[in-house]
Image (spheres, rainbow, N blue to C red):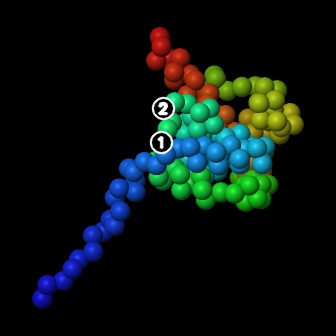
Amino acid sequence: MDRYVTPAVTDADFWTSWVPAAPFRAWLIHLADATGFTPEAIAVAAGVSTAVGRALAGGERRSHRIRSLDARGLLSLDAEALRWYGSCLTDAGLAHRALIELGSFCPGSIELAQRLGLEHQTAQGLLSGDLQMCRREVLWHCIALTQAIMSTRAAAACRL
């Protein structure tokens, strides 16, 4: 008896397919304007790399297309949901670990507070690991900041 067997992966092209970036660039900029979050932090919230968020927001020439997977992540968000999820409390441990990974490149508490728009005590708590909970938006911005610092340092090292 012949049976048709459905392949295990129904759309392998989904993972590697590309779509025009312009509508997603506009959506990301709209979300940033509506929420006050940085495009990189929105990218973290969407599960998209901060490099994609930075490229889309900056209108970099090489970002004329993005992966369909990243496009789906960005479209899964709206301003209201971002504000709501961003205001929810979450474990601050991930932010602390991200800052620890920066090692000597980690900003001090005053600079961190300024760059993330936090109170000095909150920034100290993130750095020391004493802060147990924080708003998700703080986590998103912290991860985006640490990735930006790492990216800048890696680019500088490659130029040497």
Rendering coords of residue 25 (x, y %): 60, 43
Query: Whole-Å distance between the Cαs marked 1 and 2?
Result: 8 Å
Q: Amino acid at mark 2?
A: Arg
- Say which element carries label 2: loop
Seen from this angle, which residue lies furthest bottom? 1
**Disc number for residue 25:** none
Residue 105 picture quarter: top right
Residue 15 appears in view: yes
Report the side of 141 relative to 121 (left or right). Answer: left
Give the residue at mark 1: 65
**Disc number for residue 62:** 2
Residue 148 position (above or below residue 34) = above
Seen from this angle, which residue lies furthest top? 160
Rendering coords of residue 103 (x, y %): 61, 27
Q: Residues within 10 Å of mark 1 (few under 14, many from 20)?
A: some
For the point 58% across and 38% down, the residue is 56
For the point 72% across and 44% down, the residue is 32
